[in-house]
Amino acid sequence: MLADIGIFGLGTMGENLCLNLVEKGYKVSIYNRTEEKTRKFYEKNRSSAIIPTYNLKDFVESIKKPRKVILLIKAGDPVDEAINHLLKHVEKNDIIIDAGNSHFKDSDRRYSELKKVGVNFFGIGISGGVEGARKGLSIMAGGSKEAFDEIKEILEKISAKYNGEPCFSYFGEGGSGHFVKIIHNGIEYALIESISEIFFLLSKFFDHEKISEIFNEWNKSILSSFLLSATVNILRKKENGKFLIDYILDKAEQKGTGKWSVEISLETGIPAPAIAAAVFSRYISMMKESRVKYSKLYNLSKITNFSLDLEDIKKTLLVSILLSYIQGIYLLKGSSFYNYKINVSEALRIWRAGCIIRGEILNLLYKEYLNYEDILLSNNIKNILLESFQSFLKTLSFAFNNHLPFNVISANYNYFIMVINEKLPANLTQALRDYFGAHGYKRIDKEGYFHTEWY
């Protein structure tokens, strides 16, 4: 009996997705370039619903037509190599699904190239990590609309559910699914760094057990989220009687999706300073050896007495997380720059369960976006920001006065202050551009473009 679908790549995600599919009633063919990995997985999970294969020809031929193959391999050249090998065996109308963290422009290219030979390509963004692969993912699909009808039932079955509603959606042709996933990851970067900056402040005055208690209490409020819950668990984890977090080197790595979000911001001209700050924070963290030298040279580590209310700190985290989401929403709205027609409310809807950035603030933003596509015009959002603003300022001031890194939180402060200001110092910026480069400027009292001989 032939398989309903094939999985190419048996890393942790591929293994768990296979088990998810089998549990949902599908027969799955599996293939990995390392044969031993396939054997070990099958021996451990022996089932009549799993077909182990050890070469690509057998793998492809073991799947029902039109064949559906999910690639769960490293993004970049390995995806192109896998597709080129598969093209020797697949047929017209077969479907190749890249479920890795690929760049949407690569997915656009692959979609066009495969369309020419009659093969359907899907770039699917998935969020939820290993647990999501096993129990239910947030799924962002992009590719052929006709072929989507062939795979949507499978995607629905393996997706996470929010109040029984499947968290998957089709966003259009080409790389649209991966575009949405990149913005998701950019938001994720900013949320993680916001939590980390607040943790760092609290760690100067409280032990990890106390901070975990504080975060756990906050997690019962509007701040309830997967990431805050994960932070509580991390801060409680011990090894040999000591907190594991203290043994983890303070160098944060990345795989590129955050940087791609910043590139989207720069290409579209839609500001996302919180996401950019989060990416740069990771870059700076990698300068560990230099940071050690500089810290001894400058020695600005003196900390004053704790003079903040925990409620002020809580509201600061709320504001930073809210503004980070909002910048991501505006990036999604800029998808037309790449000729996509992303349904932003659909992205917010399917992020409510399964994905890494799920949380109560996101649920609120989804509801508000249905009435306010320009989300900063929402009265509920306005009230939250204004009611929390003085607390935000207090915490920010305390961090600055005590030389604590608040890269993302301060970026969110400046973003908010700038976008709500009717006037900015950009008139002088433009005047200086005209002064040295004769770039011209617009006036508030006359129509047209003007240039002045300044000297």
Image (cartoon, rainbow, N blue to C red):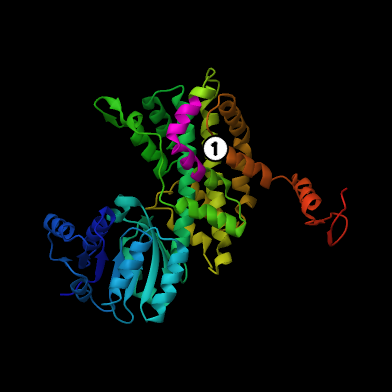
Q: Quadrant of residue 33?
A: bottom left
**Residue at the image position 57 percent from the left and 60 percent from the top:** 333
Give the residue displayed 41% in from the left and 47% down from the top.
Answer: 254
Q: Is residue 286 magenta?
A: yes
Q: Tell me: 372 left or right of 452.
A: left
Pick the quarter of the image with the N terminus: bottom left
Badge count:
1
How would you rate the neighbour count of disc 1 (Cα within 10 Å): few for under 14, some for 14-19, many for 20 or more?
some
x and y percentages locating residue 337 in the rendered image: 58, 65
Looking at the image, residue 416 lies above or below residue 43: above
Residue 117 placement, left or right of 278: left
169 in relation to 320, above or below: below
Q: Amino acid at mark 1?
A: Asn
The range drawn in magenta is 279-295
Give the residue number, with chain letter if any, for mark 1. 407
Q: Report whether residue 444 is seen.
A: yes
Where 395 falls versus 183 (above or below)? above
Say which of 166 and 280 sits in front: 280
List x then y, in percent, for residue 417: 67, 41
- Main SS of the magenta segment? helix
Quadrant of the image occupied by residue 92: bottom left
Q: Residue 428 or 289: which is nearer the viewer?
A: 289
**Residue 249 at x, y percent in the picture:** 37, 34
